[in-house]
Image (cartoon, helix red, strand yellow):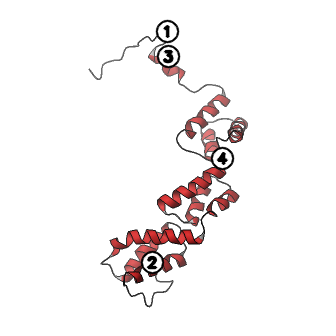
Amino acid sequence: MPYAKRRRTERPGGSSDSSRAEQELPPQDPAERARAICLRLLTGTPRTRKQLADALEKREIPQDIAEEVLSRFEDVGLINDAAFADAWVESRHHGRGLARRALARELRTKGVEPALIDEAVGQLDSEREEETARELVARKLRATRGLERDRRLRRLAGMLARKGYPEGMALRVVKRALEEEGEDTEGLDEGAY
């Protein structure tokens, strides 16, 4: 009987299933609640101080208590926006091929300070960024075969633009890839897409 009423079962020590659920409710002390919220949010994925502050505000934790808890978490290293930004840049550039501009935009939305963003995206030099753009174009190039040259150019350059690559770099990388494939790129200029 999968839908039968569940009886309260006594557990050793006098506790029952329903009292165990009551014990799992967040503590009433705002500082304890704030710590529990932060720890739960940090389990499995790093978060920025701003993300945690927003979560505490949403759950109506008083601002002074939230600041105290967040500062303590920073002091012990559970919150580290610089390390978060560095890891974000490495992961999203390597995994998704995002360029510096797109990475900076994402970090801004996560509440990372501008100086930390600049430092984190500064890890990517233009050579590495262009190499990644070439790899992205090479993966997508085959899917555009059979299309007319200008349409291929727009698709490939548009894909790079959506990932945050500058227009000049995107066009240069796409033109080079098309030329290596034997496509005539004569007459293509920077306004082509």
Q: Amino acid under label 4?
A: Asn
Image point (45%, 72%), residue name = 158
Image point (49%, 63%), residue name = 97
Badge 4 or badge 3: first in the primary sequence: 3
The x, y position of residue 108, in whole percent, is: 62, 57
Rendered-image quadrant of the N terminus: top left
Rounded to the nearest whole Å, what is the CA distance between mark 1 and mark 4?
43 Å
Badge 4 or badge 2: first in the primary sequence: 4
Rounded to the nearest whole Å, what is the CA distance between mark 4 and mark 3?
37 Å
Which residue lies under the disc numbered 3?
19
Residue 14 placement, left or right of 68: left
Rounded to the nearest whole Å, what is the CA distance between mark 4 and mark 2?
38 Å
The x, y position of residue 112, in whole percent, is: 65, 53
Q: Amino acid under label 1?
A: Gly
> Which quarter of the picture shows residue 54?
top right
Which of the two marks, 4 or 3, is nearer to us in this view? 4
Give the class, few, some or many, for how many residues have Cα within 10 Å of label 2's Cα (few <14, many ≥20): many
- Residue 174's disc is 2
Image point (57%, 58%), residue name = 89
For label 4, the SS is: loop
Badge 1 or badge 4: first in the primary sequence: 1
For label 1, the SS is: loop
Which residue lies under the disc numbered 1?
14
Give the class, few, some or many, for how many residues have Cα within 10 Å of label 4's Cα (few <14, many ≥20): some
Rounded to the nearest whole Å, what is the CA distance between mark 1 and mark 2?
71 Å
